[in-house]
Amino acid sequence: MNSSNSLTHRLVEHVVQTRYEALPDTARSAAKVFILDSLGVALSGTRVPLVSELKALAASWGRGEDARIWGTGERVPAGTAAFINGYQIHNQEWDCVHEPAVVHPMAVVLATLLADAERMGGITGRALISGCSIAVDVATGIGRSARNKLRFFRPAMCGALGATAALAHWRGFDATTTRSAMGLAYSQISGTMQAHVEGSPVLPMQIGFNTRAALNAVELAARQISGPMDFLEGPFGYFTLIDPEWDRTALENIGQQHAISELSHKPFPSGRATHGGVDGAMSLCVQHGIATSAIREIRVIAPPLVIQLVDRPAKPDMAASYARLCLPYVAATALLKGSVDVTDFNPECFADVDRLALASRIVVRRDSNPSLNALSPQRVEISLEDGREYAMDLPDVLGAPGRPLSRAQHLAKFRRAAASGIRALPEAGIQQLIDLVDQLETLQDVTQLVDALTFPKDTTA
């Protein structure tokens, strides 16, 4: 199906033809918001112990100085930088998400694009904005087409296809070469939801694996090595093998919605599917002055995807990667502490008897929503020991486009994240990053962003 009326053709034409000047102000502003958000959570992600082990492993892949690892600033090959930085964005489940697509698009995309930008040099802020917008359109257009239950790790796989599209756009590839590059990426993408089910630490590594797939794909295409052209609709394409129950509408309308304007913030460093329970339970307790000791049961009534992703029991021996995806634990933590922080996933917190006791009284129930990919609406109900009942409906969860974070809330999250890494970025560095992203469209080379992402050299871990 290589005809001009195929969805693959339409997607590729969008990639080739999109220009910064055609983007609406809402898309440009959203790109800057979520670029800054992603950089902040990546700095926080430096604190995860596995980062150092992955760096040591990556050293065996080869040496080079094309790009830098955010935070610590080591110079490494572009593929290594993208791998580590993508992992750092997603390793605490704090990065933004496109809810209808069930895709965390900026993790693969921003890590890949900035590594490539350092390698190439001369990539402007405008090019980064348009590249991110194109990549998110592609990643979420493919993701939101799916109607079947998540089986493969869609955030990583769709992210790789989106990142490849943006890299091809930067290089000025024609439609045929762009399509070939995306086919080459499709031939390498990987990721399974089994890692999610088990709470395996490999889950965020799948983001890193797919950054390298995108970089490899574009380099192969630049050398006129052909990839599969019908990578979406062919007999063994994406929609046949990976998300076989799908709808054409999202890709038919690609470019009309500017998907980067539809991303959701994550106020808390946990799976997005935990946020409805946290949002509703905290709101009810504040509104009605409910003490946690008075709670008999909390019920989170949600679509089936929430059940699939975060309905799991809290256990004293759980891993951090499991706990971030455990709604009862995250909600109990929020109610007892008033918020959720990255340190709440340190191993010693899992033995907290008060958290475990409250978590045991939080249950998740499936609603009647037929969609297998919806995260909202949700409903939270609280029953008290004295028989009183309270409930709240959540058409949108805090951080979604229908209930967005204010600029003050967005910057507060960024400051909190940037100060929570293996070393804290000083206030001057935090403000410098905010200012650079605010003025992103004026930058002549986005390596300035990476310069500002490095912890001061006179500060040691």
Image: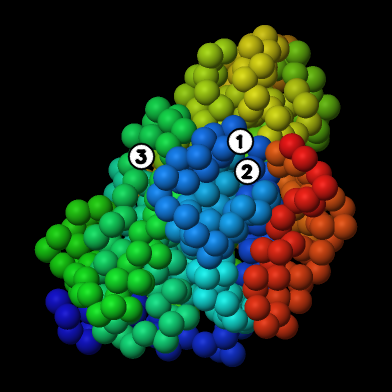
Q: Residue 162's spot in the image, x, y percent?
A: 42, 67
- At horizontal 46% and vertical 33% (from top left) the residue drawn is 201
Q: CA distance from mark 3 to mark 1?
A: 21 Å
Q: Is residue 378 left or right of residue 368?
A: right
Which tag, 3 or 2, sits closer to the chain's start? 2
Observer able to see residue 429: yes
Residue 312 numbered tag: none
Determine which quarter of the picture holds residue 346.
top right
Instruction: Say which residue label 2 marks.
Output: 45
Q: CA distance from mark 3 to mark 2?
A: 21 Å
Q: Is residue 110 left or right of residue 403?
A: left
What residue type is disc 1 on?
Val
Instruction: Say which residue label 3 marks.
Output: 193
Instruction: Say which residue label 1 marks.
Output: 48
Mark 2: which secondary structure?
helix
The answer to whether 35 is drawn above or below residue 196 in the figure is: below
Which tag, 3 or 1, sits closer to the chain's start? 1
Mark 1: which secondary structure?
loop
Q: Is residue 309 left or right of residue 356?
A: left
- At horizontal 75% and vertical 23% (from top left) the residue drawn is 336
What residue type is disc 3 on?
Met
Characterize the local packing of mark 3: few (<14), some (14-19) or many (20 or more) Cα atoms within 10 angstroms: some
Mark 3: which secondary structure?
loop
